[in-house]
Image (cartoon, rainbow, N blue to C red):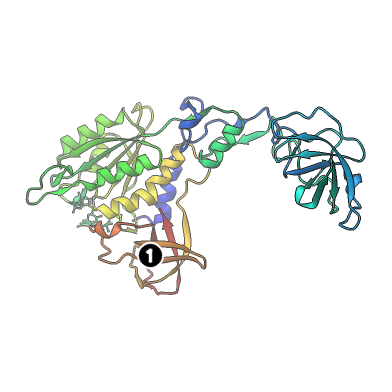
Amino acid sequence: MLPVAEAERLILNQIHPLNPETESQMVTLDKARGRVLSRPVTSSLDFPHWDNSAMDGYAVRYLDVRDCSPENPAVLEVVGEVPAGIVPDFTLQRGQAARIFTGAMIPNGADTIVMQENTQLQNQKVSVLRATKSGEFIRKQGSFYQAGNILLQSGMLVNMPEVAILAAAQCNQVSVYRRLRVAIFATGNELVPCDRPLAPGQIVDSNQYALAAGIAQMGGIPHCFGIIPDDPEATQKAISGALSMVDVIISSGGVSVGEYDYIDRILKDLGATLHVTKVKIKPGKPLTFATFTESSIPSCLYYFGLPGNPVSALVCFWRFVQPALKKLSGYSSGWQPKFVLAQNRCLLRGGPRETYVWGNLAYTPQGCEFDLAPGLQISANLINLAGTTGFAVIPAGKDQIHPGEWVQVLTI
Ligand SMILES: Nc1nc2c(c(=O)[nH]1)N[C@H]1C(S)=C(S)[C@@H](COP(=O)(O)OP(=O)(O)OC[C@H]3O[C@@H](n4cnc5c(N)ncnc54)[C@H](O)[C@@H]3O)O[C@H]1N2
Ligand code: MOO
Ligand SMILES: [Mg+2]
């Protein structure tokens, strides 16, 4: 059985990100959120584009206001007004000021802004009551970014801040990695889809729905291949059929040691290399990870055989599959699973395997806290997964983590 870190290393080492040259597409900015940039973005614009005012007030010459005070104000003649969006057509001379507003261009001759709260206006003359610093409240051209440099790096996930930046740089079309196509199927004679009546002995295939949701949530395209009976021919047919259509196949069930667990054997028959078959993790022990060589198969290179127990399948998804898919999708960073140190509120029980127990990770003003979900913490019980925000990790071989102790929590 492989330690968790070793299994993770073996999986992630096999993952080669999509090729930015051949596996990119252009999308318009309104479709870019959640996508990963496949080319660096540059702009021919400086940011700010020109010197502008950070305050509503008066544009002045610093030397005119340097020594002023409430007792000895600098009295300047107001010679013009510059609202945002207007190019000032005058030059400020000694003893002069211009009314100016936030975001407006700085007129020639001015080098400092005085905010209006520190002034008094009377008969076209403004009294500046407080000395100011040279250059104050001027947002200098190019002080945020200079044209021609890289604005956003390739491999960056586009979220709200990046959308704002791309819009400001007038990038209405961006090059992003294509979305991953992920085949999902479930194995098990006992399984039925959620809209069918249950006969005795049957349960709903919840894994396929959950995995499809997880894939969609991380930006992939799930292709649900349905429920495959516990039959070697049917299983082989399903895997072979999916291979030419997708980048990754995820199955659930059939990876343990039972008479009806065929996945590993069929993967070998199909020429796959099995890198991981058992991991020292609870839940999730019988995890299979395999690769196909590029020459033998046109499309799919990666196979995750997740255990059938519902919590085991999801823990394996969050701990191993999601990071691998993010790396494959072209993320240059941030694809690794995220752990935070939290103060534990309950008694957590471990065992010989690295144990993941689920519950609520709360971000409090004092730091993170972890509360165990009430109810049975066993891999068949998906009911108390509702509302789960994190999995506390009890290291392999550690019996207990007591309330008040610190614990690493996998965030999901
Ligand atoms: N003798 C041993 N038995 C088992 C071992 C072991 O080491 N020795 N490992 C156990 C562990 S741990 C796990 S986890 C499971 C994994 O089993 P499989 O991946 O082979 O999955 P199945 O046997 O097909 O099903 C297990 C369980 O999960 C339910 N299931 C399956 N698919 C779904 C689905 N799509 N949606 C919801 N529930 C599903 C299934 O009905 C079973 O109850 O093996 C242990 N056994
Ligand atoms: O690994 Mo199993 O997932 O312990 O139930
Ligand atoms: Mg089994």
- The residue shown at (52%, 68%) is 366
Q: Is residue 286 visible?
A: no
Which residue corresponds to mark 1?
A: 396
- The residue shown at (38%, 37%) is 220
Q: Is residue 280 visible?
A: yes
* Image quadrant in which the N terminus is located: bottom left
Q: Toward the viewer: 375 or 188?
A: 375
Q: Is residue 141 left or right of residue 397?
A: right
Task: Tell me where residue 217 sits by quadrant.
Answer: top left
**Coordinates of residue 88 in the picture (x, y in percent):** 78, 30
Q: Is residue 289 left or right of residue 49?
A: left
- The residue shown at (44%, 30%) is 178
**Coordinates of residue 370 in the picture (x, y in percent):** 41, 65
Residue type for callout 1? Ala
Q: Toward the viewer: 81 or 368?
A: 81
Q: Secondary structure at mark 1?
A: loop
**Coordinates of residue 79 in the picture (x, y in percent):** 84, 35
Q: Within 10 Å of the Cα at label 1, are there few (<14), some (14-19), or many (20+) other Cα atoms? A: some
Numbered-mark total:
1
Q: Toward the viewer: 293 or 189?
A: 189
- The residue shown at (43%, 46%) is 323
